[in-house]
Image (spheres, rainbow, N blue to C red):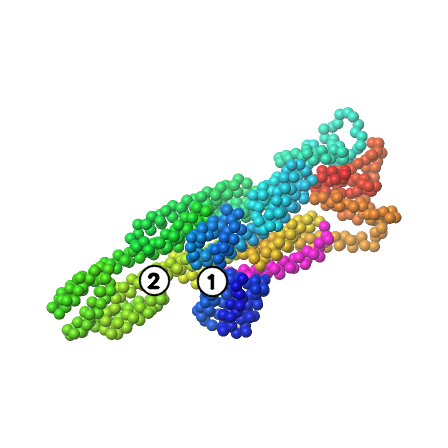
Amino acid sequence: MPDVHGEILEALRPHLGPRAEAVLEEGLKRLGKRPAELTPKDGAFLLKGLVFRELQARMRPEEARRVVEGVLARLEGQGGSLEELEGGLKRFGLYVDWPEVARLRALVNRLRQGEDPRLMAEGQALLEALEEKLEEALLRQAKDLAHLEESLERVRHLGGPKVRRLENLVETVRQAHAEGLLAQAEVERARSLALELRKLLESSAVRSPTLPEIVFETQEVEEGPKHPTDVFVTVEEAAELEGELVVDLEALPEEASQRIQALEVEEERRKLEELLARYGQLLGRATVSPLLAEVEALLEAGTPAGEKLRELEAALQEAERNLRAERRARLIQLQEALRTLPLPQKAKVPLEGALRLAEETLAEGGYPDLLPLEEELRRLEEEARRQAQEERRLEEAREGLLRELAGKGEAFRPLAEELRALAKEALAEGLARIQARYAELLKAQGEEAALRAKLAEAGSRLKALRLEAEALGLGAEVEAAEARLAQGELPDLEGLEARLAEARARRRQEALEELSRLQALAERFRGFGGEGVLRALEEEKGKPLPDPAPIARALQALKRRLEAKREELFTRLTAFFQAEARLQGFQSETARRLRPLREVLRSAQEKLPRLGPQGLLQVEKTLGQAEELLRELEKEQEAAKSVLKEIRGADLEALLGVFDQGEKPQDLSPLRLPGVEVLGFLGEALPLPKEALENFRRALDRLDEALGGGRGPAVVLMGERALILAPWKGKGLVALTERSALSAFLQELSR
């Protein structure tokens, strides 16, 4: 690997002195690399950011820019190569629906035909953007994986082929994620299946249309007709009941219906996020934006978008097809316009190559930016017009000078003959030469007044051109024209004006190309302040001579804000994990909801240095959700502590039950299923009314005696919860579960 660190250090020492080492050391810390690991791309990143700011503090911005550009030029030979681009294409080639991959494939195909530094630089920038996009996509996949694993844990007890299929899909996603790959299709199928199973779980009940308030099991059921509402659930039947879950949405209680609706809204929000990430540049289309606003309003209100979301996805797909068709049609127009342009073929070659590359990008599935190509065509059209105008101007100047010479007498006749004999190709140079000789003859003939008038007119015109000429880099030509004026010669101001127009068009083209590059960067900052930069960029494009500098400064400000946000998130993540560690042993439903977010944030903390704006926004959103749950968990812990204080001083041995000498505590972990809120034994410190539980147990004992003994689990349905009292390993077990978890709990209890 080239010594990028040494190269930069050597270049900076003359300007920064000993400070150069400190600046590079700070840059290495930010990148998390050692000097030997610094790549040319890393070097360019440091030079354009940290180093440039340090240089600006010590010299004028123009000088700082020249220093940085000089070092970048020295690193260019050590920079990217075709092999590096091919390696990147091999890595990202799996994601065929990414427009950036399509553009990279087209660039690699073109670079295989020959070197092109400009295309190589574009390829390197694309690789950087793709790395950022992949990290953001992997972060979303980590969140999906955590959601799927949590959903699988909730529905695993249902059993059956769908649960096994979900297990296989989750394992596939888990393996792909561990290898740094996206499994988009598997994630979609798994989430759809998980939603179906979660809805089934939430809406199912092991009951007939109406259930008695108390349901208990007897080992022997007296033969004879039963009332249709009598339900006796035995532990032997619990496993069979798992396959008999019925979803009746119309008959659902309001609370269960709301839970199912919340699941649907959560899934639709995630689907909308995927659509926004994939079709970001199409959101402003007239067929898309109204639907998008409607879907966002529905989801914000907690209402499933349903058909509207499907309409939005269809509208985005249609907009994508239309965009592709529009660009294909525009490419054909540009190619035809270039073909008919009255210019030498050599002048057309660069644009022809760029148009072919755009066509290849479109064929690969990308969206080529046609604005620079359109502007280049306009420049060539203007060049063709200037050439035609210049030819007419030269002919008109010849005719005018011939008429003027004809009235000057015999002394000027040889000059007129020479002017008339000039070929069209030599007219520009010959006319300037003849004008100079004409000025000398005027002097010799005593017509100095006419010459002074012409020189004064030329001086005024030249003065008006000076500022623009200097701005466009033609100051030397103005100075040469002024020198000729000082010698009493007439300069070719028409030619100078033509060259100014050409330089103006070239500068505009260069500015638009730079704005196109900056636009690709600004797109990555959508949602992070990039919208304002994009609006300013569009305004700048409409100016006669755009200036990319204000846009570049605005993007630099966004980059500084991005780094500040990265540091802020790192601090918040550190504080979150410290606080969460103190609550790790506390178990509750809130803790269970927090667990998948915690795993996502651990993954995010590792990726934080490599994430772009969209990735940091995802991390901030997830962290906000986790911090809110953490605050709830802290409140629950405080409530639990207050309960313990209330029972402090009581006879804990009696309250918790005295184990036999040598007897080991009963392991209740197999019964701690998702949806089980309270679990313990009668007599223990449970968050339930102790006296009411004892009275209920005594009532069941009397019923048991009256019915002939052999009591099994007894269930009380209370709204969306179920209270279970059951003999278990010689003790009285008490459990409070969600109603949807009842059948799974009874099944586990029977084992």
Q: Residue at x 64, y 38 (%)?
A: 162
Q: Nearer the viewer, mark 1 or mark 2?
A: 1
Give the image quarter of residue 396: bottom left
Q: Is residue 512 visible in the rendered structure shown here?
A: yes
| Quadrant that contains the C terminus | top right
Q: What residue would you read off at disc 2? A: 503
Near mark 1 (Cα within 10 A), the count class, few <14, some 14-19 or many ≥20, is few
The image shows a total of numbered marks equal to: 2
C-alpha gap between disc 1 and disc 2 = 29 Å
Residue 77, disc: 1
What residue appears at the point 80 percent right and 30 percent down from the top-left corner?
A: 220
Q: Residue furthest top?
A: 224
Please say whether residue 585 is one of the residues in the magenta stretch.
yes
Q: Is residue 505 found left or right of 565 in the rendered image? A: left
Is residue 244 positioned above or below 602 on the image? above
Say which label, 1 or 2, has the lower sequence index: 1
401 vs 275: above or below: below
Q: Main secondary structure of the magenta part?
A: helix
Determine whether 204 is above or below 574 in the image.
Answer: above
Answer whether residue 260 is visible to the viewer in this image.
Answer: no
Specify few, some or many for label 2: CA neighbours under 10 Å numbering under 14, 14-19, or 20 or more.
some
Element carrying mark 2: helix
Residues in magenta? 558-587
Q: Amino acid at mark 2?
A: Ala
Residue at figure coordinates x 72%, y 52% from the top left: 586
Residue 297 magenta-drawn?
no
